[in-house]
Image: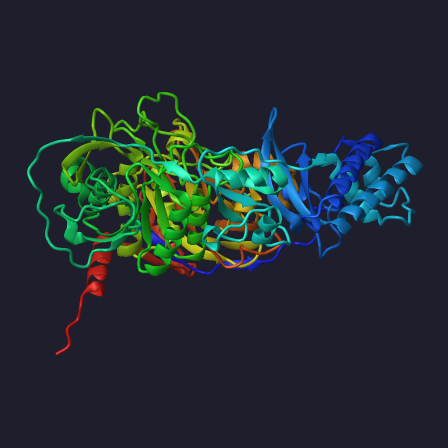
């Protein structure tokens, strides 16, 4: 087998061209008539009257219903905005999908009453212009002639650019209204209100709700009791952006206890530490010396033996799983655990855990990998991320850590699969579902996607089933169990091995795991149940490749719009490249929960492939989103085919056995390009780290890794072999305690 290679070199950075999108126009063959403008004008006038009659906010919350999933370039360009200092995109405070027949964007803005008045005025001018010069209707061809000055534009009431932008706005908008959330909960609820220019606590006081600061999570998220929520719904329902129950029942895992001999274990030395956030831990088990336990529950909360089973079982896998599951020996050794007990065995308060997790990570910065096998019985919402997942995503954007999350389970007796439970909707985390030993989804598996689009779970692993259960240690002895809770710890072990022992970045480590789960075949299994695939059991199968494969990792930082390197020397044989390829990209973007379905703030679009004679990358997935192709692509297709806005992207050729060599162009190098796109006005993508794993498969079975290494070094790449034994020796030496005489 070939070692994994690490390539270190320079990425070039280039800013985006300012004239990328061309002149403003409607789609070819489309038009806007005066009745459409009049309908939108009536919507805005009615909304203006309603907002002038209320005294709660100085501005107005306006919800825009689009005719489809709208790319940023198809959203409001003029209406609900005013000049370059206040573009409409800047006022977005929420986004979701409506599902009448097909998904459509529903986006909420918070704007001043002056901007609303100005939009009404501008729309009125547009109606007058359509009446005066265009017989009440304007289409793509007429706008094209206006842009080319073949049709003169002589109106002084509104600038030509604004007139055309409003016409295009009107085409993509179905209607304007106010969004009302009608949430009903029997217990306390975590409520997120739209962000406005009035502080949350002041808004609540105005409508008669007084809460302590301890029940405020951030500037828009609060914990309300049922009676308080009823007041909010009665007096200001338009403020509610999202609502979820605070009391989450934990998804159950099946325990079958057995009587067996006591296992023995040596004392820990310099092994890496994995963080575990779970139910309580029993310090009487045989491996307790390997675990540093911190109980985060209030002393006022009564506990019993059941509260210790789940957490102890999860930690037993991380410390010593291969000892009692030899068929899953991953070659990673043992790990120490810092275990934080944050929940009882049956339910947990999300609001309390949210506060605990932030504090736990902040105070334990030496830990890079965290395992969280708690999950809610309730389904995630298709229109917004859960508060638990959002805080995990925020933590991972701001800190160099990774969370491994269990994909949650069906309840006992359930046979029909349903959506994942929180926090398995965390986008930055590695979400793990369970499979049986035949690599088929376990009977208790729940499914994605998240926000109707993101691939979750990310990957799958063995979590036990009735035929081959997982063996764990609990406070009352060894037990046979099954559940996604017991698949996740195995992934946490592998992730810690890659990061803490082999010294890889979290971006590369996550990409390697996803990459190792993929094959050269077209995926047959359902990604909503299994993710990108099933991770290999032994870690050497992750950091090694077959003799006819060249596998290497590259990491970098996105600083500008285009981050690229056109210097990858894929071997050439008789003027051809006898290879197929696959690549996986991972990054940890900033996310905005108040943006609803438009959750990730930054998109990195990957292209990888040969350079043609125009020095353009012929991407292996035929990606034509970027401007050099000058082709239009609908937002739905960009998300479906090229995973636009997803922070994990896997592209690959399919090996059929009949693949042909690829033509080598005049410049026989391959190129890699990442295009950075932003949803919000803030540039969260600047300084964003990324990791890429690439595998080249020689279609004739020839091992060409030495030639690749030589050519890469000649092209100024620094090439390191990831030799597992050598890296372990380096880790052990680095962790040794030196005694000075």
264 vs 625, left or right, is: left
Question: What colour scheme has been applied to the protein in the rendered image?
Answer: rainbow
> Which residue extends farthest bottom?
741
User: Which of the 4 image quadrants contains residue 331?
Assistant: top left
Asked whether, in this view, residue 178 is left or right of residue 482, the answer is right
Q: Is residue 730 above or below residue 692?
A: below
Quarter where residue 383 is shown: top right
Q: Position of residue 737 (x, y in %)?
A: 18, 68
Q: Position of residue 142 (x, y in %)?
A: 84, 37
Left or right of 594? Residue 529 is left
> Which residue is rendered at x = 14% and y = 36% of the image?
478
Q: Is residue 119 above or below residue 400?
A: above
Front in this rendered view, residue 429 or 665: 429
Answer left or right for 116 relative to 676.
Answer: right
- Residue 544 visible in image: no
Residue 273: in sight, yes or no? yes
Name the quarter where the C terminus is drawn.
Answer: bottom left
Quarter of the image that includes the N terminus: top left
Depth check: 94 or 167 in front? Answer: 94
Asked if 196 appears above or below 662 in the picture, the reply is: below
Point out residue 288 in the picture as x, y percentages from the top left corner: 16, 50
Residue 63 falls in which quadrant of the image?
Answer: top right
Residue under the image location 40 percent in, 45 percent down: 429
Q: Residue at x 28, y 50 (%)?
A: 299
- How many dots with numbers? 0
Q: Position of residue 733 (x, y in %)?
A: 20, 64
């Amino acid at each position: 087998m070939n070692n994994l290679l690490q390539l270190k070199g320079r990425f070039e950075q280039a800013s985006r061209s300012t004239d990328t999108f061309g002149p403003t126009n409607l789609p070819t063959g489309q038009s806007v008539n005066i009745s459409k403008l009049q309908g939108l004008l009536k919507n805005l006038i009615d909304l203006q009257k309603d907002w002038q009659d209320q005294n709660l906010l100085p501005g107005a919350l306006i919800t825009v219903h689009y005719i489809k999933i709208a790319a940023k370039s198809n959203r409001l360009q003029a209406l609900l905005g005013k000049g370059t200092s206040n573009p409409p995109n800047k006022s977005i405070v929420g986004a979701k999908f409506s599902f009448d027949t097909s998904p459509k964007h529903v986006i909420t803005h918070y704007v001043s009453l002056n901007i609303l008045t100005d939009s009404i005025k501008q729309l009125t001018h547009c109606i007058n212009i359509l009446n005066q010069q265009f017989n009440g209707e304007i289409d793509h061809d007429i706008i094209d002639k206006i842009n080319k000055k073949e049709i003169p534009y002589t109106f002084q009431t509104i600038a030509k650019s604004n007139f055309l932008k409003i016409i295009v706005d009107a085409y993509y908008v179905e209607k304007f209204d106010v969004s009302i959330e009608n949430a009903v909960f029997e217990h306390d609820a975590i409520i997120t209100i739209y962000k406005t220019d009035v502080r949350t606590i002041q808004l609540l006081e105005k409508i008669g709700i007084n809460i302590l600061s301890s029940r405020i999570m951030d500037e828009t998220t609060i914990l309300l009791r049922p009676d308080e929520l009823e007041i909010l719904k009665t007096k200001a329902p338009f403020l509610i952006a999202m609502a979820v129950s605070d009391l989450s029942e934990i998804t159950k895992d099946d325990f079958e206890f057995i009587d067996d001999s006591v296992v023995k274990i040596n004392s820990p030395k310099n092994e890496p530490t994995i963080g575990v956030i779970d139910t309580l831990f029993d310090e009487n088990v045989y491996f307790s010396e390997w675990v540093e336990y911190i109980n985060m529950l209030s002393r006022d909360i009564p506990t019993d033996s059941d509260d210790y089973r789940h957490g102890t079982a999860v930690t037993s896998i991380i410390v010593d799983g291969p000892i009692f599951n030899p068929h899953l020996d991953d070659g990673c050794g043992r790990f120490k655990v810092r275990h934080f007990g944050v929940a009882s065995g049956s339910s947990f308060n999300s609001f309390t855990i949210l506060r605990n997790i932030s504090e736990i990570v902040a105070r334990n910065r030496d830990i890079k990998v965290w395992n969280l096998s708690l999950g809610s019985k309730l389904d995630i919402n298709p229109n917004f991320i859960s508060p638990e997942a959002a805080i995990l995503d925020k933590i991972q954007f701001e800190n160099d850590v990774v969370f491994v999350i269990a994909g949650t389970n069906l309840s006992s007796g359930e046979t029909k699969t349903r959506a994942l439970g929180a926090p398995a909707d965390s986008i930055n985390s590695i979400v793990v579902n369970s499979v049986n030993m035949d690599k088929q989804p376990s009977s208790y598996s729940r499914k994605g996607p998240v926000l109707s689009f993101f691939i979750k779970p990310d990957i799958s692993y063995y979590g036990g089933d009735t035929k081959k259960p997982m063996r764990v240690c609990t406070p009352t002895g060894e037990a046979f169990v099954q559940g996604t809770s017991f698949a996740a710890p195995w992934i946490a072990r592998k992730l810690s091995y890659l990061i803490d022992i082999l010294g890889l970045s979290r971006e590369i480590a996550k990409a390697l795991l996803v990459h190792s789960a993929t094959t050269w075949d077209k995926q047959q299994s359902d990604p909503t149940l299994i993710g990108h695939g099933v991770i290999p059991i032994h870690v050497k199968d992750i950091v090694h490749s077959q003799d006819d494969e060249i596998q290497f990792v590259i990491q970098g930082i996105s600083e500008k719009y285009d981050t690229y390197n056109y210097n990858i020397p894929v071997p050439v044989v008789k003027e051809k490249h006898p290879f197929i390829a696959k690549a996986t990209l991972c990054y940890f973007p900033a996310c905005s929960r108040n943006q609803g379905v438009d959750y990730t703030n930054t998109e990195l679009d990957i292209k990888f492939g040969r350079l043609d004679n125009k020095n353009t990358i012929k991407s292996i997935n035929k990606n034509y989103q970027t401007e050099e192709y000058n082709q239009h692509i609908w937002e739905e297709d960009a998300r479906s085919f090229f995973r636009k806005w997803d922070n994990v992207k896997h592209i690959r050729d399919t090996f059929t056995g009949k693949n042909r060599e690829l033509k080598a162009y005049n410049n026989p190098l391959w190129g890699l390009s990442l295009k950075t796109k932003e949803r919000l006005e803030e540039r969260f993508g600047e300084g964003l780290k990324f990791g890429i794993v690439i595998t080249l498969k020689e279609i004739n079975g020839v091992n060409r890794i030495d030639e690749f290494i030589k050519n890469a070094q000649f092209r100024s790449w620094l090439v390191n072999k990831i030799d597992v034994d050598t890296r372990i020796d380096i880790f052990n030496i680095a962790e040794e305690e030196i005694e000075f005489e």
